[in-house]
Image (spheres, rainbow, N blue to C red):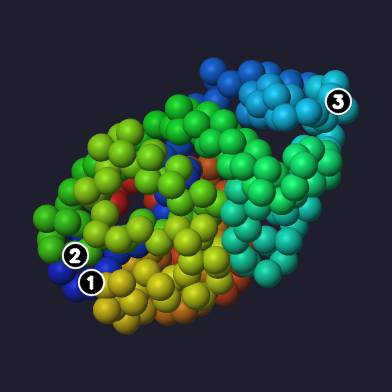
Amino acid sequence: MPGHDWSKLKCVSIDLFDTIIALDTSDLPRVQWQGKEIPSTAPRVYDEISRFGCTLPFEAFLPILQKNQDDVLAEKEERNIEISATIRFLRLAEKLDIGSDDLERMDIAKRLTKVHMDCIDESSRVIDGTRPLIDEIRDAGVPVVLISNFDHAPAAQKILLRHDLTNSFDHLVISDGVGLRKPHPGIFQEAMNRCDATPEATLHIGDDPIADAWGAARLGLRTIWINRKSKDFPREDHLPERTVLTLREITR
C-alpha cells in the first residue's frame, strides 16, 4: 500500500499502546519478582493501600497483588471481555479484607486505580510517526477511531490530553467502555458503527498480531500489522494485508 489511497476508506481505526503510545517505565520503582528486578507500580499501590489498614509486609503483599492481576487477566482472555481496573482493585481490597463495607472498599479501589493509572500516564510517550500518520489520514477526510484494550477509559483520555492527541481522533472506542476486548468482533463493530462504515471500507492498524491484525482481518477489515520485532505471524488464516516495522512506513 505505498502511497496509500485513504480516500477509498470510510474509517481507520488505530490501536493505542505499543502502536502509537509506548510506556517508558525507567522511572518506576523496581521490585524483585521471580528472580528478576522489574519496574512496577506495586510499591506505590502498596503505599496507598497501607493507609487503609493493610498491615502485610510488601514481600507478602506482592504475591497477592500479582495473583489477583493474573486471575483477572485470565478471565478477560478467556471471554475477550473487559474488567475495569476499579473492579480489579476492588477484588484486591476484598482479598486483603480491608474496608469496613462495600462502599469503603469501592472508595479504596478508586484510589488505588488512580495511583496505578497516574504512573501509566506519567510513563507514556508518543511513538515516532504517530502524528504524521494521523494527520495524513485526517487530511484525506477519513474519520480516525482510537480502539484500545484498556481497563480505565479516563486514563486513556488523560494520556491523549497529555500528548495533545485528543483532537486527533473522531471517536474513542475503549474496551473499558464497551465491555469487550479485541479480538472480540463487537469492539471492532462498535468502531465501524461510529463511522457508519462497512468492513471493506475500514482499515485497522495495530501491533498485536492476534488482537489487532487477526481479529480485524477475520471480520473482513483491511489490516496493517506493526511488526517492530520482525516476528512470524502466529496464524495461517486471516493474514494482515500489510506488515510494516514502523508507523512511518505507512505514510507517503
Amino acid type of disc 3? Leu
For label 1, count other residues whose C-alpha is less than 10 Å away and answer few (under 14), some (14-19) or many (20+): many
Name the residue beneath numbered marker 1: 9
Callouts 2 and 1 close, C-beta under 8 Å = yes
Please give the label number shown on residue 56.
3
Name the residue beneath numbered marker 2: 142
**Res 41 → quadrant:** top right
Callouts 3 and 2 close, C-beta under 8 Å = no
Q: Is residue 7 above or below residue 56?
A: below
Q: Position of residue 229 (x, y in %)?
A: 53, 42
SS of the residue at dot 2?
loop
SS of the residue at dot 1?
loop
Residue 203 visible in the picture: yes
For label 3, count other residues whose C-alpha is less than 10 Å away and answer few (under 14), some (14-19) or many (20+): few
Query: Which residue is located at x 45 percent, y 58 percent?
Result: 174
Residue 229 falls left or right of residue 80: left
Residue 70 visible in the picture: no
Amino acid type of disc 1? Leu
Q: Quadrant of the N terminus?
A: bottom left
Q: Nearer the viewer, mark 3 or mark 1?
A: 3
Earlier sequence position, callout 2 versus callout 1? 1
C-alpha separation, residue under disc 2 versus residue under disc 1: 7 Å
Query: Which residue is located at x 13 percent, y 61 percent?
Result: 140
Earlier sequence position, callout 3 versus callout 2? 3
SS of the residue at dot 3?
loop
Query: Which residue is located at x 75 percent, y 57 percent?
Result: 74
Earlier sequence position, callout 3 versus callout 1? 1
